[in-house]
Image: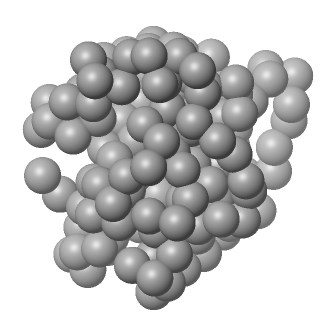
Amino acid sequence: MKNLFEQQTQQEIISRINSLSANSQRQWGMMDAAQMLAHAATPLEYALGIKQGKQSLIGKIFKPFAKNVFFEEKPYKQNLPTAPEFKIAPADQKQFDAEKKKLVDLLHRFQGDGKNELGKHPHIFLGKITADEWARTMYKHLDHHLRQFAA
């Protein structure tokens, strides 16, 4: 499975982000392109310790059953539930260029500092995971939302 520590994979993701515009149309869901970029950045902030959180109770209960969904090759299904910490309210207007820059900056930081930082901070659903698991699930999450906007 691809992961964000691979230089080529990160470049692919950044190229796909750069192919978006503020007017890019979603294929499913409710977020516009700027909101999606803000949403996609939030888990990276948790992974890097910029935002603090702990594993949810539902994550503790269902982790043994759901962990494979996060790490298998198969893409996420459309319209899966989202952790409340990651939700962007429909009325929460975001500035596309600022959100795009923030996401790309976080990706560079993730690759640069990631192996030192990751694993120190819990995933909201999975709890304690390794740096490599963070890199794989963050790739999968970004791929999911970039496919949502046909990027």
Q: Which colour scheme is used?
A: one colour
**The residue positioned farthest toward the bottom in the image shown:** 112
Instruction: Name the side, left or right, on which 10 lies relative to 126.
Output: left
Total marks shown come to 0
Locate residue 95, reporting x and y percent.
81, 51
Q: Which residue is drawn at 39% across and 78% down?
A: 115
Name the one closer to the observer, 76 or 64.
Answer: 64
Based on the displayed image, in which of its 4 quarters is residue 66 positioned?
A: top left
Residue 104 at least partly seen: no
Which quadrant of the figure contains the C terminus?
top left
Q: Residue at x 81, y 43 (%)?
A: 94
Name the one closer to the observer, 98 or 72.
Answer: 72
- Say above or below: 90 vs 110: above
Instruction: Name the side, left or right, on which 114 lies relative to 85.
Output: left
- Say above or below: 81 vs 25: above
Name the one closer to the observer, 76 or 94.
Answer: 76
Locate residue 42, reporting x and y percent.
64, 49
Name the one closer to the observer, 55 or 14.
Answer: 55
Locate residue 51, reporting x and y percent.
74, 56
- Say above or below: 105 vs 143: below
Instruction: Name the side, left or right, on which 48 lies relative to 128.
Output: right
Residue 58 at least partly seen: yes
Based on the displayed image, in which of its 4 quarters is residue 109 positioned?
A: bottom right
Q: Which residue is drawn at 17% across and 57% down?
A: 2
